[in-house]
Image (tube, coloured by chain):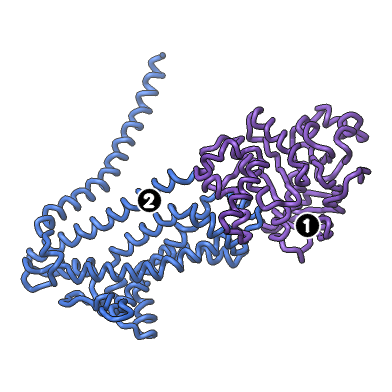
Chain colours: A purple, B blue
């Protein structure tokens, strides 16, 4: 299951089971997230890809009756992020997330990006400004908003809002960035910009992206994991998976025989 | 169209028209009564609404009497109520919505809060008489009255604040948590500010209910004829604020009104009408403020 590759490991999922109450949503998922690469999770609706992604930053802890089993080891210090002894707040400070629908706070553009820094206790104006600008530049939004940082975030278009959310996630300098179908609410042009951005961002941060769009996975990712009914069916380099899948189910899915 | 079909339609439409008429009259009974009431109050009371009326003490002579102690008492009682009920109610609502685990204990608390909102207000008066007046020996004071009304509107405040908090979308909370915010940071930076429009509206509506409450205050022993003002809340020496007024006896506008209505002289009834008009004016003003605030926040906050 673990493909050979050149780069170092950023995270390792080992024997991950996940339960919503009595319903098991993930069964024995194993995969390796390579540092500085983009890993895509694909699969039909309800296959558990988003559930799997939300294990990486312990999002499920916000809701009652959820339960993790197994390990998600975060490198270099090899902590098991889903272990009870690990504080989910620490995990979320190291692992950022961009959501399916753009969800900016009803605050100014500047305050949206600065929020992650503020809750960490950063309040020196110069430092805030410097980091907010850097994050907005990394999210390819700086030129569009630099003259209106005090405007409310909702004046931005959907695509701009999503890039604002990316800047917000980048500002505290995370080690791992999770994308949960980040373009499903966007038009094709905005989608293309986000995809371009994802490919650029892997220089700075390791990325895991959930997508229901196979072309998107093929375009942006280096590794792809195909999930079905809560299990990992196949995990490989993206180009190999899309040209020469080893599993019949994967082949059927990527050739569009079911979705 | 065949004649039988036409007959059928006509027949069924008669019932339609009949119900519309019944429904309209049912609606009018409420509206017209209210309008008549207000009109009556205006006709009787408006001539009495002079500067003298607001600056005079009650008197044996109806044309010299006024509602000075009553409106001062109402304001001070409401001040105590606000300071007691707002922090308690909002904190309880935040706890129930954001912190409390979902289990049978919180279900039980929830059902009881909803039930408390329906308890007759005089029962609160009895409780306050036993607890504040006799047990804590606070007397029939402004403090007792304020705390009693605070308890009375506490369930309302909890319910409306929870409603407001629930209107903040989950996606906003998740965004904050995903950045590593703690629960309290999420609440104070996002949930509270974004729900403050709804919360304020609920608070004001609760106060406008408390302003008119009479029964619980009569139960704790509010005076109905008072010819003095409570101690002023300020003093010339340090620390400038004084709290002696908290323990003063008081009256409030609805009690003053009740007192005048129960007198035989017609002229006192006019005073009562004028007081009622003042009360209605206060309530309408508060409701208007609530509507204004709600509209303003709705415009400012968009998801």
Quadrant of the drawing holding the N terminus of chain A: top right
Task: Measuring from the top left, give residue B54's x and y in whole percent.
Answer: 15, 65
Q: Nearer the viewer, residue A53 or A250?
A: A53
Quadrant of the drawing holding the C terminus of chain A: top right
At horizontal 27% and vertical 53% (from top left) the residue drawn is B284
Tag on residue B293?
2
Give the answer, above or below, for where B183 lies relative to B39. below
Which image quadrant is residue B146 in?
bottom left
Q: Secondary structure at mark 1?
A: strand
Task: Measuring from the top left, give residue B22's x and y in whole percent.
Answer: 30, 39
Which image quadrant is residue A103 in?
top right
Q: Nearer the viewer, mark 1 or mark 2?
A: 2
At horizontal 72% and vertical 63% (from top left) the residue drawn is A87
Task: Measuring from the top left, give residue B64's x and y in whole percent.
Answer: 7, 68
Task: Measuring from the top left, give residue A122's x and y in whole percent.
Answer: 61, 59
Q: Nearer the viewer, residue B143 or B121?
A: B143
Count neighbours of disc 1 (C-alpha within 10 A) and say few if under 14, some if 14 to 19, many if 20 or more: some
Q: Secondary structure at mark 2?
A: helix
Q: What residue sits right under mark 1 in the picture?
A: A68
Tag on residue A41?
none
Q: Numbered disc 1: what chain?
A: A
At horizontal 78% and vertical 42% (from top left) the residue drawn is A203
Looking at the image, residue B68 sits to the left or right of residue A193; the answer is left
Q: In this rendering, does residue A199 appear at all?
A: yes
As drawn, the residue found furthest toward the top would be: B1
Real-space CA distance between mark 1 and mark 2, rounded to the nearest whole angstrom = 44 Å
Looking at the image, residue B299 sits to the left or right of residue B248; the answer is right
Looking at the image, residue B199 sits to the left or right of residue B261; the answer is right
At horizontal 42% and vertical 65% (from top left) the residue drawn is B86
């Amino acid at each position: 299951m673990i493909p050979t590759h050149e780069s170092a490991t950023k995270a390792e999922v080992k024997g991950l089971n996940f339960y919503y109450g009595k319903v098991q949503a993930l069964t024995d998922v194993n995969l390796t997230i390579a540092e500085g690469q983009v890993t895509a999770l694909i699969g039909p609706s309800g296959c558990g890809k988003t559930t799997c992604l939300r294990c990486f930053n312990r999002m499920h802890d916000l809701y009652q009756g959820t339960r993790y089993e197994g390990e998600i080891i975060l490198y270099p210090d090899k902590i098991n992020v889903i272990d009870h002894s690990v504080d989910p707040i620490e995990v979320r400070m190291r692992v950022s997330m961009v959501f399916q629908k753009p969800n900016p706070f009803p605050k100014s553009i500047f305050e949206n990006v600065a929020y992650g820094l503020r809750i960490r206790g950063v309040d020196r104006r110069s430092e805030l400004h410097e980091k907010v600008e850097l994050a907005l530049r990394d999210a390819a939004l700086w030129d569009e908003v630099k003259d209106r940082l005090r405007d409310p975030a909702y004046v931005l278009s959907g695509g701009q809002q999503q890039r604002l959310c990316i800047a917000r996630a980048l500002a505290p300098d995370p080690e791992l960035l999770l994308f949960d179908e980040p373009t499903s609410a966007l038009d094709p042009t905005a989608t293309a910009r986000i995809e371009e951005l994802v490919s650029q961002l892997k220089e700075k941060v390791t990325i895991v992206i959930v997508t229901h769009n196979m072309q998107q996975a093929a375009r942006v990712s280096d590794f792809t994991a195909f999930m079905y009914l809560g299990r990992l069916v196949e995990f490989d380099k993206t180009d190999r998976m899309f040209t020469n899948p080893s599993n019949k189910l994967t082949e059927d899915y990527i050739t569009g025989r079911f979705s | 169209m065949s004649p039988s079909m036409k007959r059928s339609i006509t027949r069924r439409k008669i019932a339609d028209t009949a119900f519309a008429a019944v429904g309209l009259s049912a609606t009018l009974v409420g509206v017209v009564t209210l309008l008549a009431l207000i009109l009556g109050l205006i006709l009787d009371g408006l001539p009495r609404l002079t500067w003298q009326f607001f600056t005079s003490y009650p008197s044996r002579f109806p044309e010299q009497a006024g509602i000075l102690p009553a409106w001062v008492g109402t304001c001070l009682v409401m001040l105590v109520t606000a300071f007691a009920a707002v922090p308690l109610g909002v904190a309880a609502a935040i706890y129930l919505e954001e912190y409390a685990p979902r289990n049978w204990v919180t279900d039980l608390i929830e059902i009881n809060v909803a039930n408390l909102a329906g308890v007759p207000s005089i029962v609160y008066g009895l409780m306050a008489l036993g607890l504040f007046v006799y047990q804590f020996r606070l007397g029939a004071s402004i403090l007792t009255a304020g705390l009693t009304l605070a308890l009375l509107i506490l369930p309302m405040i909890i319910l409306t604040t929870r409603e407001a908090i629930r209107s903040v979308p989950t996606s906003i909370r998740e965004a904050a948590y995903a950045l590593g915010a703690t629960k309290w940071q999420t609440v104070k930076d996002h949930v509270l500010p974004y729900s403050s429009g709804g919360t304020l509206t609920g608070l004001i509506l609760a106060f406008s209910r408390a302003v008119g409450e009479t029964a619980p205050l009569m139960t704790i022993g509010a005076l109905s004829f008072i010819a003095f003002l409570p101690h002023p809340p300020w003093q010339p020496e340090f620390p400038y604020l004084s709290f002696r007024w908290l323990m003063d006896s008081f009256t409030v506008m609805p009690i003053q009104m009740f007192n005048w209505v129960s007198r035989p002289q017609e002229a006192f009834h006019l005073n009562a009408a004028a007081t009622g008009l003042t009360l209605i004016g206060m309530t309408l003003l508060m409701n208007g403020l609530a509507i204004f605030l709600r509209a303003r926040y709705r415009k400012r906050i968009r998801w």
